[in-house]
Image (cartoon, coloured by chain):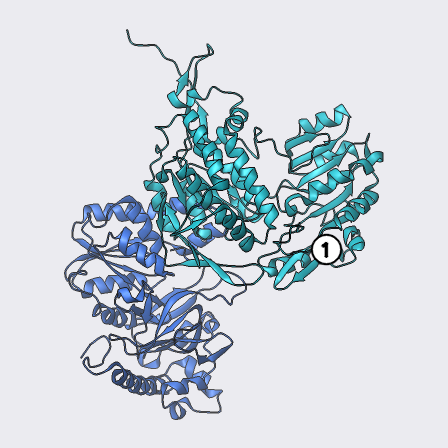
Amino acid sequence: MIEIPILRCGEPYESIETVTLLHHATGEPFARVHQANSGMVRRDMVNMRDDALESFSISDLVAMAKKAGEIFMSATLPLGNAKQSFDEYVKQLSCSTGMPISYCRDNASKIAGVLGKMDEVLAGLTRGLDLEVLDQGFSNASGQMLSFYRAGRIFGAVLPSNSPGVHSLWAPAMVLKAPIVLKPGREEPWTPYRMIEAFAAAGFPREAMGFYPTDHGGAGELLRSADRAMLFGGGATVRPYENDPRIELHGPGYSKVILGDDVADDWAQYVDLMATSIDRNGGRSCINASAIWSPRHGREVAEAVGKALARHKALPADDPNATLAAFANPAVADQINNVIEHALSDDGAEDLCATHRGTPRLAHLGRCAYLQPSVIWCESREHTLANREFLFPYASVVECPVGEIADAIGPTLVATVITRDESFVHALMNHPNVDRLNIGNVPTWRISWDQPHEGNLFELLYRQRAFQFEPAA
Amino acid sequence: MNSATGTSVGSSIDERAAAAKVALDEHTREIVSWHFDPKTGTPFWLDYASKLDWNPRDEVKCYNDLDKFDFFEDEWLRQGKVRSWVPKAYANDPIYTFETGGSTGVPKSRINIKDFRIDYEQFSDTLSDETFPRGGDWLMLGPSGPRRLRLAVEHLCQHRGGICFCVDMDPRWVVKLIKSSRLREMHEYKDHVINQGLTLLRAHKNIQCLFTTPKLLEALCERVSLVEYGIKGVFCGGTQLTAQFHRFAREELLEGKIDFVPTYGNTLMGLACHKPFDPADNYSVIYHPPSPRAMIEVVEPDDTRKVVEYGKVGRARLTTLTKEFFMPRFLERDEGVRTRPCEEYPWDGVADVRPFSGFATPIVEGVY
C-alpha cells in the first residue's frame, strides 16, 4: 500500500484518517491518502512563513523552476516513505483516475513545458515587466517609477482530479515568491505531490509548500486562510465564492467552436477542428469544446462531428490506443448518462454520435464504466442539453443567427471563432462572456501559456503601488 | 464502589458486565413501572398503553423486553403537548423544557426537572480533580438558549465548587448562514463569540476549566495559548469529534499540557462519557452511555432491532430510562463502531461517532 502523507509546510505528517484509493479497473486498494483535519489546515496557514521565497531573485526562481520541470519528468522522487520514478507516477495516476496512460504522459509533458519556459509565462502574465522590480520592490529603469507589492502572501489552491494539466496553472505562483498550500483532488494527489518534491529537489525551500488532502470543510478553511487562491470545481462549488476577489474561480468552461456567417456553408472543412476540440485529452478539460454554434447547417454539422467521434471506444487505460478515461467511480458515469438520457426523452434533441457508433453511450469494461462520445443536435439553443458540460467528449450543436451569438452564448472559457467577418469578431472581442478568444483555425485546447487563463495570476498576487523616491540628502 | 458506574472495581470485566446487566434489567422494570403507573406515570405513555393489547408493567421484565415497544419517534416530541411528558408524580415541580434540533421547523422538546443535574453530577465523578480542580472557575463557550448544555455545564461547575462564566453561540443562526453560503458572516459571528470568551479569560484568572465545541476550541487556540491562560482541563462536545481531531487537540491545540475530555450527548439521552485516554486506542473517541440511566447501542441499519458485532459499524440507537423521561429505542441520526466494555464502564460503548451515512440528504453538521 502506498502511503501519501500530508506535507505540513513541506514536512511529511501521517494522519489517523486516510482515504483509500482503488485501482479503477480492479477495485484493489493501492494507496492511502492521509487526510488533514480542517483545523490543521487553518493552523498551519496562519503560522506559515509568507516570506520563505523572498531571499531568492525571480531569475533564480525561474531557473529553479526549469530544473524542477526536468526533475519532474525524469527523477526518482520521495513519495511518503517510499520512492517514485516517473513511470511509476504515470501508472499510479492512471490507476486512480482511469485516464489513459498516454494522456497521463502528455499532461506531464505539458506541466514540464510550463516549468521549462517560466520566463515566457511570466512575460505574458506581466506584459514584459522587468521582473527585477519584484525583487527590489521598485524600479525606475524605464524612466517611469514602478512599484509592486505582493498581496498574495500565502497562495492556496483547491485542485481537481479531472486532468493533471491544470497543475501548470498554479506553478507560476512559486516563482512569483508566493508560498503555496495545495488541496489535491480526491483521486489525483499524485501530480501536486510530485511537483512539490520536484520543486524541493530543485532548491525551493520545503517550508514554502504545503500539501493538505482534506475534506470539504478543510477546503473551506484553505480558501478562508489564503490571501489569494484558485478554486476548481463545478458550479455549486464555486458559487459561494463568486464575489470574493481573493479567489480565482475555475468552474465549468462551456468552451465553444463558433462558425461565422461567411464560413457556415463550408462547415465540412472544419469538422476535424471541431472534433479535436471536443475529444482531446478524453474530453475532460474545461478547454474542451462542449458546444458548436453555427447560423445554419446545424444538424449536418452534428452528423459529421458525431461520425468523426464515433471511432472512440472504451479501452483499458494501459492500451496504447485508449482515448477515453474510465470513471474510477462507475456510479458517476451512470448518473451522467441518466441525466443525458432523461433530457433526450424530451423532444428537440438527438444524439447523432450514438447512431453512428451503434452502441450505447454508457459502456462497461469489468468494474469500470466509460462514457463514449456524444454529439447532441439541439433544435433550440434553449434545450436543456444545449449548454451543458460533462466529464467526457460531449458537445451540443445549435443554430443561432450570428448577430445574436455574442449575447446568447453565456459564459465561455474558450471560444474558437471561425470567420473573416470583422464586425462579428469585434462583437466577440468586446463581449465579457468570452475569456479566451481564438480567431481562426485554433483548437479550443491549444493554450498559449504566456496568455492569462481565467484571470491573470500575476494580477491576483501583486498590486501596483504609488511610489516616490528621493534619496536623503 | 465506583459511584459513576455503580459497580465494584476489582472483579473481572465480565463479572462486572454481568452485574451491570442485572442492574440495567432491574432499573428498566422500575422505570417502565413508574411511567405506566396511573398514579406516577407520564400522560403520553399512559395514553399509549391504553391503545396496546399488552401491559408494559406486566410484560417488561428486562431491558431486552423494551423491544416490544415500537421505535420511539422524535415527532412525538414536536406535537406541542409538552405537558403530556410530565410524569404525574412531578406535576407540581418546576419544569424545564430543553430543545434539540429546530434549525428549521418545530424543535424537539424534552422536559427536565433534575435529570440534567444528576447526569452532570455523575459525569463530574469521572473528572480528575487535578485537571478540573475543585473550586476552579469555568468558561462555558457554546450553545445555550433553549438547550440544556448551559445549565448543565454551569451545574457541573457549581457542583465542583466553581463559578461558571458563559458566552452564548446560536447554532441555528450558524446553520442558516452556512446553508445560504454566507461564510463571511459565519466567521464574523464566530469571532464575536471568541472575542467575548477571550475577554472573560483575560479578566478572570481563576478560570481553569473550559467547556467548548471543537470548532470554537480551534478558533480560541488560534488566538491564544490556553496553557498560558492557565486552563487545565477542556471538556469538549456538541458535535462530531474525529480521531484525528482528538489527536490534533491533545498534541497541538492544548500543547500536550491540558486534559481533554470529549463527550457525546444530547438533550434526549443525557451525557455519554469518553473512555479514558489510552494510546492503544489510537485516539479513537470511544463513548460509554450512563448505564442504567441511558443506553447507546449500535444496530444494523437495515435491521434496527439487531445489535451489530463488536468492531462493526452501525446506527446509534438510544434508550433513556429515568423517572423524568422514558425513551425506548430511538434511532439517532449518527452511526459508529460497537466497542467492548472497558474497565471504567463495563458495558458496550460506541466509537468514531459520525453522521449516519444512510440518509439521502446530508445534514448540516459540525457547525459548533
Indicate the amino acid at tag 1.
Ala
Residue shown at the point (38%, 61%) measured from the top left: B240
Residue furthest toward the top? Answer: A473
| Residue nearest the observer in this picture, A46 or B111 | A46
Which corner quadrant of the image does residue A418 belong to?
top right
Q: Chain A is drawn in which colour?
A: cyan
| Residue nearest the observer in this picture, A376 or A440 | A440
| Chain letter, colour blue | B
| Residue nearest the observer in this picture, B347 or A420 | A420
Residue furthest toward the bottom? Answer: B58
Q: Helix or strand or loop: what does disc 1 sit on? A: helix
Image quadrant where one finds the C terminus of chain B = bottom left
Which corner quadrant of the image does residue B44 belong to?
bottom left
Residue shown at the point (34%, 44%) measured from the top left: A44
Chain letter of the residue beneath label 1 in the structure image: A
Residue shown at the point (25%, 72%) measured from the top left: B118
- Where residue A96 sits: x, y (%)? 53, 55
- Where residue A223 sits: x, y (%)? 44, 43
- Where residue A377 sits: x, y (%)? 78, 48
The residue where tag 1 is placed is A343
| Residue nearest the observer in this picture, B237 or B254 | B254
Q: Can residue A57 be seen in this view?
A: yes
Q: Decide: few, some or many residues near mark 1? Use Cα within 10 Å; few <14, some 14-19, many ≥20.
A: some
Q: Is B174 rendered above or below residue A398?
A: below
Left or right placement of residue A127 versus residue A416 in this view: left
Image quadrant where one finds the N terminus of chain B = bottom left
- Where residue A97 sits: x, y (%)? 56, 53
